[in-house]
Amino acid sequence: MPHPWRVDAREGAAIQEALRRRVRLADELGEVRRIAGMDVGFRDGGATACAAVTCLSWPGLRLEESHCVYRGVEMPYIPGLLSFRELPAVLDALAALSAPPELILCDGQGIAHPRRLGIAAHLGVLTGLPTIGAAKSRLVGEHGPVGRERGARAPLLDGAERLGTVLRTRTGVRPLYVSPGHRLDCDTACEWVLACCTRYRLPEPTHAADRLASRGRC
DNA sequence: GCGACAG
DNA sequence: ATCTTGTCGC
């Protein structure tokens, strides 16, 4: 069932508490042929959102399709409620794809969230598709040091609970905060992100969407 | 009350 | 996220 997108902190948290029960963290990936990436940029001083969705082949990571959708922004940015601000436009862009992807890489957290429903988990539950969260910075969780080389990692923890992995995707760059969104586990999420990071700090699908949503032509 | 806080 | 040129480094 759909839910409102314009919410205050209390209502947003209540919706997240209800949706988190639908998140599945067991590996359910079938054959992966296309991996989607998504990101949202803002224009007009934050009044308009531009959601970009890309679809790349697997293996090969060749760009096969991309879509951009503009939409008026209805929610301010509130830590913990990012998905309410960005998903409406992302869902529209995703609907424009010629076929659903087998996996979606998101710019933000998966379950590494106060209520375990970051934007990737939220998107996974709403679409039913496998999703992964790959964020550029931390929202919640603690971790030890991460080696400087590509592939080095440290578990992201909240006490004894495993939330994801802090992963160095390129030697010398700041690590990414990787966590499962829906239908896969922490280790599988980490492997897919690393496999998709061939040229940049961000996975290729996300990087391509990032370009379109910010300075690209949509 | 104070600090933290995805994009 | 966004406002913004040049600059340090591999």
Image (cartoon, coloured by chain):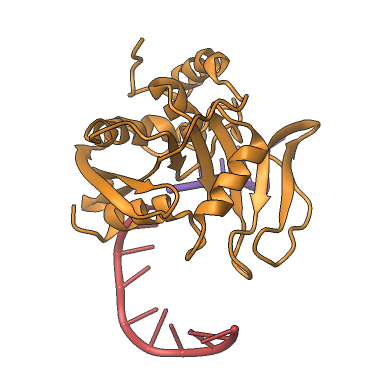
Chain colours: A orange, B purple, C red
Where is residue A18? Give x, y as percent: 52, 12
Residue drawn at 58 percent across, 34 percent down: A180
Where is residue A196? Give x, y as percent: 50, 53
Q: Is residue A57 above or below residue A85?
A: below
The answer to which of A212 and A203 lies nearer the viewer is A203
Where is residue A76? Give x, y as percent: 36, 37
The answer to which of C5 and A120 lies nearer the viewer is A120
- Total numbered circles: 0
Q: Is residue A138 visible?
A: no
Q: Is residue A76 visible?
A: yes
Q: Residue furthest top?
A: A1
The answer to which of A121 and A50 lies nearer the viewer is A121
Residue drawn at 27 percent across, 35 percent down: A89
Residue drawn at 28 percent across, 49 percent down: A64
Q: Is residue A150 above or below residue A59?
A: below
Q: Is residue A59 above or below residue A10?
A: below
Q: Is residue A18 above or below residue A69?
A: above
Figure quadrant of the N terminus of chain A: top left
Horizontal side of residue B2 vs A36, given as left or right: right
Residue A187 figure quarter: top right
Where is residue A151? Give x, y as percent: 67, 58
Residue A92 figure quarter: top left
The answer to which of C9 and C8 lies nearer the viewer is C9
Horizontal side of residue A182 vs A89, given as left or right: right
Residue B1 figure quarter: top right
